[in-house]
Amino acid sequence: MAGEVLINDKPYFVRPNPATGRLATVIERQLDDFVDSFQPEGQQQQTGLKDLSSKIFGPWSGGFGRNRVPSLRANDPAEYRMFWDATIDTRWADAVLAILNEDSTETGLEVLRASASFKSNLWAIWEDDTSTDLVSRKYVGSTTTWTAGGNVLADGTTKVGLDIVAHKTHLLALMANANDHLVYRSTDGASYSAASTQPTANLLTNVVTANENSDFGLIAEIGGEAVLILWHESNGTVTFFSSTDAGDNWSDESVDIATTDGVKGVAVMAGIDNADKLYVMLAEGLWEVDTSPATWTTRLIDPLPRHTDNGRRMTVHNGALWYGIGVDDDSPAPVKRLVNQDGVRRIEQGWGLNVGDGVPSDMLGPIKWMKSVNDFLFVSVGGGAASRQARILCHTVDPTTDEAGWHFMYQHDTANLLIDWIDVSPDDDGTQRLHFGVRTTTSTTDTQFLAKPLSSPRSGVSIKRQATGIIDLPEIDGGMPGIKATWARVSVGAVDLSATKSNEYMLAQHGLEGAARTTTTLGNLVSGTKFVDYASGAGEAGVSDAVRLSLFRDTGAGDDTDSPSLQSCEMDYLKVPDTREALIFTIDLDKTARDRSPKRPRPELVLADLKTARDLKTFPPLKYGDAPTMHGKIRRVNAFYELRDGSHQAIAVAPDRLIERGGFAEVEFHEIISLVEYLYGAARYGAAYYA
């Protein structure tokens, strides 16, 4: 049956095509959404699955920093080795429950300031007796207690501990006593005596207050000499003293650097000439001090925006100087590296927690302490405000991929409390411990530890672990942010799961299109069922989705070393573009020409209009019958010509121009913008609304 279509607002008469034998006026078929892929390899691959698409996460060597995978990088495997949040240990190929924090005993002590390993023992200086005593205590691993030791100085004067280091035959303890800097020495950690020649007196303007947090000074060792880096408060400078006799006599080096806020960090590392240099961090930036000439020289090598937490307790790690950049409690902590190599100084950015998408809000805030041990760099961060919970993180580099990232070690459960000291030591009993101190009040440090922090889960070493933990995977949209998906299944590659949720198991939850990852519970993952389906197999619709996996262990007696081992996670989905149609119909060129101009029909003009619509750089509209207007592209015009006499023309033309083409033109029209929204609107408002 014949009819009419409008293409680019011009009418065309359509009819069955006698040349093709088609009886229908318009043939409508669904367009394929995706091209067929060709896979030359013979083995089965995840990308070769029909219908469903999959994304595989893990191992998580990239660490923190990815809340949502950018659509442009949806096919980059590195994106799926990162996560948004975690309270499990992701440093290894097997992600497991984090190490259990255990309490140490510090009876009667107040604030721990610093620690040092000396003669196979870990020694720390503590303030005591309302900060009028500075005491030294040894850590005893068998009882996990700070004990033994003795008084560094107990003279009734208010004092605060600043630093302690092992230097040659002595422990050197530095304190601010009243408004003086004092050094005391010990050969056994228990009995201390004052240095014979102290640094210049009265460098501090005011008498220190009890348990005051300060940056009055630090100790370093370079070229076999001990060095004091002290704040000369009244002059607004940092000044330097050195000792060649194990800290007994101190000489002023007559070198000063202007600053308004004391000493933040100090480290020793080879300079670009391969000779050791002293690096000093102040609120205003990083300074290099050359101690080799008779008169020391200084150079500002990395000026920074002034901040009291710039480079706090910076450290040398794997041949580079790492230092945090001070930020407020609402910002993620940046980290820089100074690398001196082959006569070139290079300052690298992009090593901190501000990389990528940053970190969850409870992790915001500056770095307070750094500690390098083997391939691991441990830091304490955050905890400086309400809703900010201090964490200990670990930076690692995966040797197989060279991917670097920050990983979870511990999170304190109370906000607005700092972890302002960390150390790692096997001293006393040979058990490696990551020690840390939580500043629970202005006058109290609560010390705890994580045992065996350097041991892999695959080592077979028995490690006590937390009862629960989570990992929040990045939100993904499959690289198609404008197309909804049917989210089908979450699967895990995991071992050490129990048969039921009574022991070791996992829980999968998810949130569509930016909703919290705990919005919908998918189900439990156990040894016999390592996958869960969305909506019991029906799937759930959304442009994007994000998954949380929670890990659990048996909390019974003797089970604190158990943990599920998470190796990978797979999300299966089907992107479902809105349906688009292709129309095939035949235009009667002669009838269309007669309908347009009964007196002087011109089939050539009809054909020209059709080709003009075909060649448009926009999407011409098409309408036929009661169907809504479609926009798309004319993909094909196949003409079936009949040559006819055109002598009726009113203008003079050459004889060979008196022949016109008539006949039929078969047109294939592809819808580009789907009609789904129109059909929805028609159902809601009525077809006339979209006519």
Image (tube, rainbow, N blue to C red):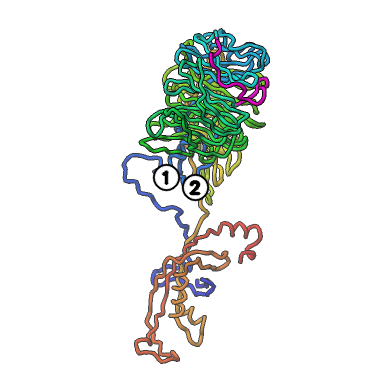
Element type where label 2 sits in the image: helix
Q: CA distance from mark 1 to mark 2?
A: 22 Å
The quarter of the picture where the C terminus appears is: bottom right
Residue 442 image offset from top left, x and y in percent: 67, 22
Name the residue carrying label 2: 71
Quarter of the image where one finds residue 149: top right
Residue 85 place in picture, x, y as percent: 55, 33
Where on the picture, by quarter, is residue 549? top right
- The residue at 45%/43% (across/down) is 53
Rendering coords of residue 205 (x, y %): 65, 26
* Above/below status of 283 relative to 478: above
Local packing at callout 1 (Cα closer than 10 Å; few below 14, some 14-19, many 20+) is few
Q: Which mark is residue 670?
A: none
Q: Is residue 566 visible?
A: no
Main structural element of the magenta stretch: helix, strand or loop?
A: loop
Between discs 1 and 2, the one toward the N terminus: 1
| Pointer 1 residue | 50
| Residue 485 locus on image (x, y percent) | 52, 46
Part of the protein shown in magenta? 192-214
Q: Is residue 502 above or below residue 22?
A: above
The one nearer the camera, 662 or 119, is 119
Q: Is residue 196 magenta?
A: yes
Disc 1 secondary structure class: loop
Drawn side of residue 216 relative to residue 269, left or right: right
Q: Is residue 682 left or right of residue 226?
A: right
Front-most of 172 and 525? 172
**For the residues carrying marks 1 and 2, which lies nearer the camera in this image?**
2
Q: Amino acid at mark 1?
A: Lys
Examine the structure image and report whether residue 623 is included in the region drawn in magenta. Answer: no
Q: Amino acid at mark 2?
A: Ser
